[in-house]
Image (spheres, rainbow, N blue to C red):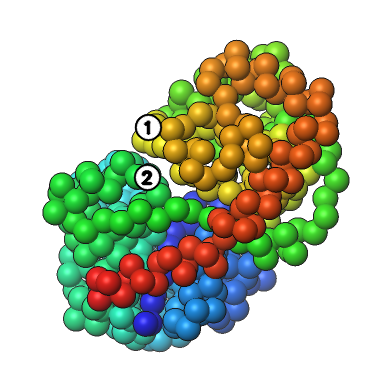
Amino acid sequence: MKILIVDTYYPAFLRSFWHRHPELRGAPYAKQRRALLAQCFGTADYYSRNLRAVGQTAQDLVVNDAISQRTWAREHQVPVRTAGVYAWLQSLPLLHRIIGRPAWVQEVVLAQIQTIKPDVLYVHDLSILNPETIRAARQWVTLVVGQTASPLPAERNVKAFDLILTSFPHFVPRLRALGVNAEFLKIAFEPRVLERVGEEERIYDVSFIGSFSPHHQAGTKLLEAVAAKHPIHIWGHGVRYLAPNSPLRRQYHGEAWGLDMYRVLGQSRIVLNRHISTAEHYANNMRLYETTGMGAMLLTDTKKNLSELFRVGKEVVAYRSVTDLATKLRYYLDHERERSNIAQAGQRRTLREHTYAARMRELVPILEQYL
């Protein structure tokens, strides 16, 4: 199979990347893309590299990165309209549900699809391609697949896909009820990151890396309650949503993207995790695997399927409330050997079962089934 992976990166990460690498603005597209993927942001090239390892043809596009995408368009003589105020409005949360995503994104990605002619178009953001774009792409694509671990976009976007993969078990029947094929696929960890980061000293007792957006409001309140009594080293974006007197601001270290995020995990003894409300009763997020993969002890919210992923109390630790979280935090800080044993066991489990190599071996038969 020839698989084209369509991804989007957080605008804050893209701004940070281009600010740190102005020398790449005039570079060829291939060099820009390699540099972006080398940052290990999100799923980076974890899908494409591991798909190629099992005999598939795969490549990545970061379609909301205006600089590299316009470089591709220039190299292929594809005219692209200027991104103005309307395009900016189309990039805002919620508003794009009404007015669609920016025209320049649609134009460039359509030209890329026409050039590459993949068997499978694999889209990590269900709303980045307008339904009209997906319809137009079908003349060059056999199967259009989406993947989600976020709140669902407008129904018209969801129904544009032939198949949607999700790490939310409860989303599978809901998507099927909409008439969309859906399958369950867990997230994972890429072991190559360990080589890139190297051995780090565990200098942070407790850390948290994440977002403080309105989607995470319940989790933010929980973290604030704990941080009022126990120091927590904080990294993340959306800090503007925190109250001026939030205890999370006391040890806020800024944003940590890609390899910088992995380094923090590698420097932490205990990493706190909480899921967004959309996850409901299920554990699914990337931090489960990133934390354990980097050898820190994961302290995460209790979910009914967590024991299917890890042995609770042996490979990860789960909390049920603010009080329970504070108690367990104190206990494992005072019992280093137990903490270390759990962290090492969690890492072994992730490296054994929860890698992108393993996930791509699961993904290929699913795609073949629907082709």
Residue 70 occupies which quadrant of the picture?
Answer: bottom left
Q: Is residue 60 left or right of residue 23?
A: left
Q: Earlier in the sequence, mark 1 or mark 2?
A: 2
> Quick one: SS at disc 1?
loop
Locate the C terminus by quadrant.
bottom left
Above-or-below relation of 147 to 112 = above
Residue 370 in the figure: left or right of residue 199:
left
Residue at image point 44% right, 81% down: 56
Q: Circles 1 and 2: CB distance less than 8 Å?
A: yes
> Quadrant location of the N terminus?
bottom left
List the residue tagged with mark 2.
Answer: 168
Check disc 2 and give the amino acid type.
Phe
Residue 213, position as x, y percentages in the image: 47, 33
State the SS at label 2.
loop
Residue in the image at 38% along x and 77% along y: 3
Circle 1 residue = 280
Residue 99 in view: no
Residue 276 spot, x, y in % from top left:
44, 34
The amino acid beneath tag 1 is: Glu
Tell me if mark 2 has few (under 14), some (14-19) or many (20+) residues whose alpha carbon lies within 10 angstroms of its own.
many
